[in-house]
Image (cartoon, rainbow, N blue to C red):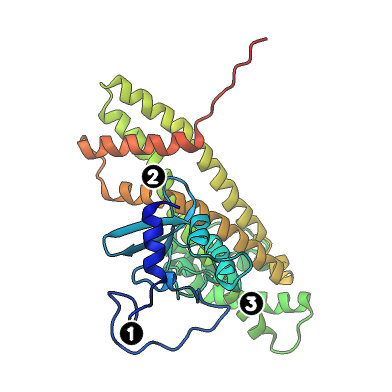
Amino acid sequence: MSDSNATLAEQARSPVPEGGPAGAGTDSAAPAAPRDTHFDFEHKVFSISGAFFATDAATKQPVLNITLGDLKASLPFKTLKESFDIKDGTHDAKLLEMVEKGLAYVKQIRPGEKIPGELLDGSASWSVEPQHLMIAKGRITVQLVSWVTGSEMIIVDLDELEQVVEDPQTKSRLKSAYGQIAEKLGITDNAEQYINDRIDDLAQELSYIEALRDRFKHIRAISDNLTRIGQLYRSDRLLVSEVARMQGMIKKPLRRYDAIFEQADAQTGEIVGALKAFDTTVTFIRKIRDDLRTQLMEWEELLQAWDNVPVERSMAIEQLQKATYRFLASRYLETKVWERK
């Protein structure tokens, strides 16, 4: 253990002043959070004011970030457990395992916070915008109308979806569809309410897919922006060459993400089957949601940078281009191993 870590460990083991760790308020302590639903660590090191867990950018490993006076440290879990004598199998050790899993869904976790819903009951730990729920409900409505009329409808535009959902003729067809679906599912009591509730539940689950689809469009926008940069810097052969390689690299994740969204759409494309195997459908949607969310978190810092930099000749866009090249090359650069025959 390094001297700095030893000093941190000694300070963390010292009694916590009355009123909480340094920097904490003097208000009376809040009621203890329920066990098994919150990160209710027991060791005093986790009660240090400002302590938080995150994934280290360099090592990609979970760490506990703490500050004691002038000392700051990012402690990998192995070092943390050794420094503060946290034994395997103890309550705190099990929570550290939960933290590691939870960081796949959120960027930071603070001791005392609620465990992400993905690890508790499968629900999402993040929220969606109203328009994403509207899109999901609209897509299902279109599927129901297509099913009951026998003619497929494909609508992507949000305004058009909203018009279809609010159309009186659509509502009439939905009522007919609910009756036919209830009959196929063998539901007799409160059939319309039952189907309507199931549709609402399914739309809620799919709204997260729509939110992710919306955000992943920004990755495709990077590809479009690279084309624009190539035009702006067409006299710079080195940069144009780099841009061409970047466009080749970014095609790989774009194809993969498109395939994942197609899987999600296919799973709910046959609406009667999706409702009949409702629990299985929800489990499938949530797995895709969580996989996409984890992958998106890798991109988020880069996406935010592109959102904030105008695509024009500038030092900022040149630096962003280089940062994007490093990001893509570290993940998607295809290399060939040449073997001498």
In the picture of the structure, the residue carrying the numbered disc 3 is 198
Disc 1/disc 3 C-alpha distance (Å): 52 Å
Percent x, y of residue 153: 58, 59
Q: Which residue is mark 2?
A: 221
Return the mark for residue 18.
Answer: 1
Q: Secondary structure at mark 1?
A: loop
Q: Quadrant of the C terminus?
A: top right
Q: CA distance from mark 2 to mark 1?
A: 53 Å
Please give the label number shown on residue 284: none
Q: Is residue 80 left or right of residue 218?
A: right
Precedes in sequence: disc 2 or disc 1 = 1
Residue at (79% x, 80% y) in the render = 186
Q: Residues within 10 Å of mark 3 (few under 14, many from 20)?
A: some
- Specify whether 231 is left or right of 244: left
| Vertical relation: 328 (above or below) 341 | below
Relative horizontal placement of residue 271, taking residue 317 as reference (left or right)? right
Q: Exactly how many numbered labels are in the figure?
A: 3
- Badge 1 vs badge 3, beta-carbon distance below 8 Å: no
Query: Which is more toward the observer, 333 or 269?
Result: 333
